[in-house]
Amino acid sequence: MRMTAIISEYNPFHNGHYYQATTARRETDADVIVAIMSGTFMQRGEPAFTDKWTRAQAAVASGAIDLVLELPFYFAVQRADRFALGGVTIAETIGCQSLSFGSECGDIEPFLHAAAEQIEETPAYKEALHDGLSVGLSSAHAASQAFRSVSQTLDLTQPNNTLGYYYARAANTLSLHTTKRIGSGYHDLSTGDIMSATAIRAHHQTHGQLLALPEQTEDVLANASFANFSHYYPWIRQRLLTTPVPELIRIAGIDASLAPRLMEGAKQATTFDTFLNYVKTRRYTRTSLQRALIYLLTSTTAEEVARIDYDHVDFVRPLAFSERGRQALKTIKTRTAVFSTFTSHPWLTKESQVTAAYALPLARYDALLEHRRFPYFAGSSSK
């Protein structure tokens, strides 16, 4: 059984994702397409548009995805290299032969070349990175500028190219394939048959309408509850205004310099966007701040994050699957533990806490029963 992995967020699953998955199946001759999907919070530190169970069901209902496995919170809400390494580790652990990803480049050779060069280890990159940091740029912005200055074959300032580079760096046994991104770019808010997930969420928030989704996916999402940061700001604000500084700086992403800035911002700002504009600087970017706030919301400490081993997993958790996905799980069970029901594993305990942090501001009290949830099986009435 040939399995191809796609590391994803599906926030939400849209026509571009459908195109990528069907192209990956054809080009890699895959029997099964496995999506390794972020759960309730995203890589850039944002709440999921809708809950992970609904998003997983929507992906499988499209017919393009056979199996959705959860990318654990500790891997999902991370900088790009760790996000990529965590996803690749799962793909290799379960025995996938291939990994497919979308990119602005569309040609796999530049990724393989850049990974082989180990750009980050070159003196030119290190010098450019140092120069950026010395003028007060954030580590992410400085790294982006350093990549731009040294990479002649690949534009690593583009978000999907950057992830592709880190997939190539992390992969040991996987054959890598990339599909050129079509339609609008990551931050492009234009509408059409192929839209970015950012544009789909923005249009829904403004007009209450979902666009550019496969028909089956749209049916699944028709009665979903949707989230954005405005739902969470009152909870974040309460934490910032009532948590002592020594406790606050134990949270991952919050240091002694940032803590008072966050607290003052919470005093001044009544909306999330106003708050973020108040506290962000060249050093503290929007993405790094959002991740820190998600860590605060989920009580995730720096000590917790420091203990994470990104190149080892001892279980996977299915969220949704088709009949082909069900057959794949039989094979996966010979390689690692498969937790279809809730167990006492510490990472699942964390997922339960994270889901509570996601669900309570939405008054989604059913989501608090995560320990009773079963994967969605396409063609059945059970969820």
Image: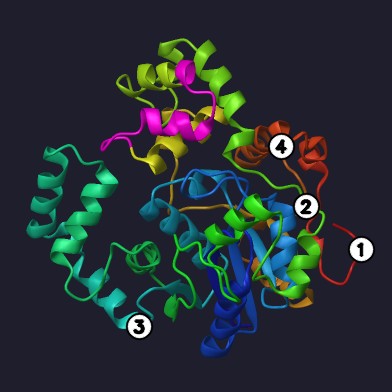
> Residue 140 at x, y = what percent?
29, 47
Q: Which residues are magenta?
A: 266-284
Along the line of sight, the residue nearer the viewer: 187 or 17: 187
The residue wearing badge 4 is 359
Label 1 close to label 2 by CB (< 8 Å):
no
> Residue 170 at x, y = what percent?
37, 63
Secondary structure beneath dot 2 equals loop
Residue 381: mark: 1
Q: Tell me if residue 256 comes above or below residue 146 in the rendering.
A: above
> Residue 187 at x, y = what percent?
44, 60
- Which numbered disc, 4 or 2, marks the residue that appears first in the sequence? 2
Which quarter of the rendering shows the N terminus?
A: bottom right
Secondary structure beneath dot 3 equals loop
Neighbour tally class for label 3: few under 14, some 14-19, many 20 plus, Cα within 10 Å: some
- Which numbered disc, 3 or 1, marks the residue that appears first in the sequence? 3
Real-space CA distance between mark 1 and mark 4, rounded to the nearest whole angstrom: 23 Å
Secondary structure beneath dot 4 equals helix
- Which numbered disc, 1 or 4, marks the residue that appears first in the sequence? 4
Residue 337 part of the magenta segment: no
Residue depicted at x 35% and y 83%? 107
The residue wearing badge 3 is 107
Q: Is residue 328 left or right of residue 254?
A: right
Q: Residue furthest right?
A: 381
Real-space CA distance between mark 3 and mark 1, rounded to the nearest whole angstrom: 41 Å
Along the line of sight, the residue nearer the viewer: 49 or 146: 49
> Residue 288 at x, y = what percent?
38, 39
What is the three-letter code of the residue carrying label 1?
Answer: Ser
